[in-house]
Image (spheres, rainbow, N blue to C red):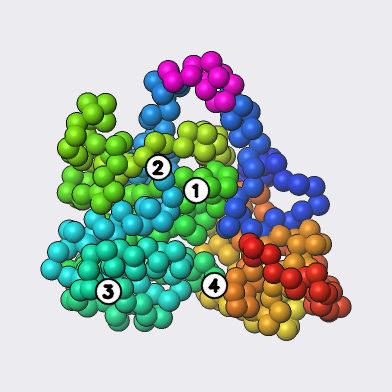
Amino acid sequence: MPTDFSATRALFDLPEGVIYLDGNSLGPLPRAVPARLQKAVVDEWGQMLITGWNKAGWMDLPTRLGDRIARLIGAEPGHVVLGDTLSIKVYQALASSLEMNPKRRVILSDTGNFPSDLYMAEGLCRTLGPDYTLKTVAPEEVLDAIDDSVAVLMITEVDYRTGRRHDMAALTAKAHAAGALAVWDLAHSAGATDVKVAEGGADFAVGCTYKYLNSGPGGPAFIYVAPRHAEVARPALSGWLGHEAPFAFDLNYRPGAGIERMRVGTPPVLQMVALDAALDVWEGVEIADLRARSIELCEAFIQGVEVACPGLELATPRDPALRGSQVSFRHPEGYAVMQALIARGVIGDFRAPDILRFGFTPLYIGLEEVEGAVRILAEILATNAWDRPEFKTRAKVT
């Protein structure tokens, strides 16, 4: 039976009168999170004190939650672990990949990748020496750019600005045929699309949890290591909790078994507790149903906007197979238009230089919200309601 998304909608605490189309940047609060956090703070931290690491199972949260996320990204159980930030997980995956492919020195990515991923790659190359380089090409040129000079392909599956979706299976197959490894960033696809890291052949995959997985601001990131690499990949960040026996307090590092070696520092327990409660929303949700509803919502939004707002230019691929669960339109005053929308209760976000970005999350968004967002956007554009000084003043977060 298809998922009843009215049931999942009831599991979120959404402000009255708000159409929230920014879950691709920060997911809303699941209703179960506050009580679960209170229990962790008052009953566990408050009463158990340090014994909570054992009694409350805090130390096992990274791998237990990893298994819960594995189902959502098509990964094998026991091969995903949580902790640290996405940038750190990108660094880990890239460093391990380069060490596993020692005769090559090129990281290949694309110009649509999230800048932080590119920054981490640049920093790693500087650390390793002048022979290592990051090469970027246009997103549509990635397949042809994969050759026998590439050590590792680093791609974000869904472009954060346009929503363009790369073909994981095809690009990974080309990388492997050329002797390269493939690292996939799932920040804008985990919990939004039918991700299949195992079937797609990914060597490593990383992602954050505060977007479509609703763990809250600053929620921990995850990393996937394919089973064939689990006992081979060496973590560049050889942290205490990635040690084979952390509480033996050995002075020399020995990597832990399998995915455990990708742990670095102390788990952020309260953030992981929030994520644990948030993942309960996914119980009974079939990813295929989620994807089908996502396509329905995005199609309705595109069609509605193109009829009602002829001045906007679609920046997202028209073919549903080539996009994630977001829709972007271009407008020369995109920032001001988005601020006017937010003032009217339609929350999306802006990405430089001119993109209005809208995320569609079937867990709590339906056709009624799509129609309302189109109507308000059309009113703002028709009346030039965006052309006010307060809407043109840039905030720190856009």
Q: Earlier in the sequence, mark 3 or mark 4?
A: 3
- Name the residue carrying label 4: 162
Would residue 277 be found to the left or right of residue 260 on screen? right
Q: Label 4 is placed on what type of residue?
A: Thr
Q: Nearer the viewer, residue 200 or 380?
A: 380
Q: Is residue 201 visible?
A: no
Against 329, residue 37 (above or below) is above
- Name the residue carrying label 3: 133
- Give the CA separation, mark 4 to mark 2: 28 Å
Is there CB contact under 8 Å for labels 2 and 1? yes
- Name the residue carrying label 2: 82
Q: Is residue 92 visible?
A: yes
- Name the residue carrying label 1: 209
Residue 329's tag is none
Q: Earlier in the sequence, mark 4 or mark 1?
A: 4
- Give the CA separation, mark 3 to mark 4: 26 Å
Q: Earlier in the sequence, mark 3 or mark 1?
A: 3
Q: Magenta segment: does it hold 41?
A: yes
* Occupied quadrant, residue 105: bottom left
Quick one: SS at disc 1?
Answer: loop
- Most distant residue in the left direction: 103
Quick one: SS at disc 4?
Answer: loop
Closer to the eye: label 4 or 2 = 2
Residue at 51% over, 45% down = 219
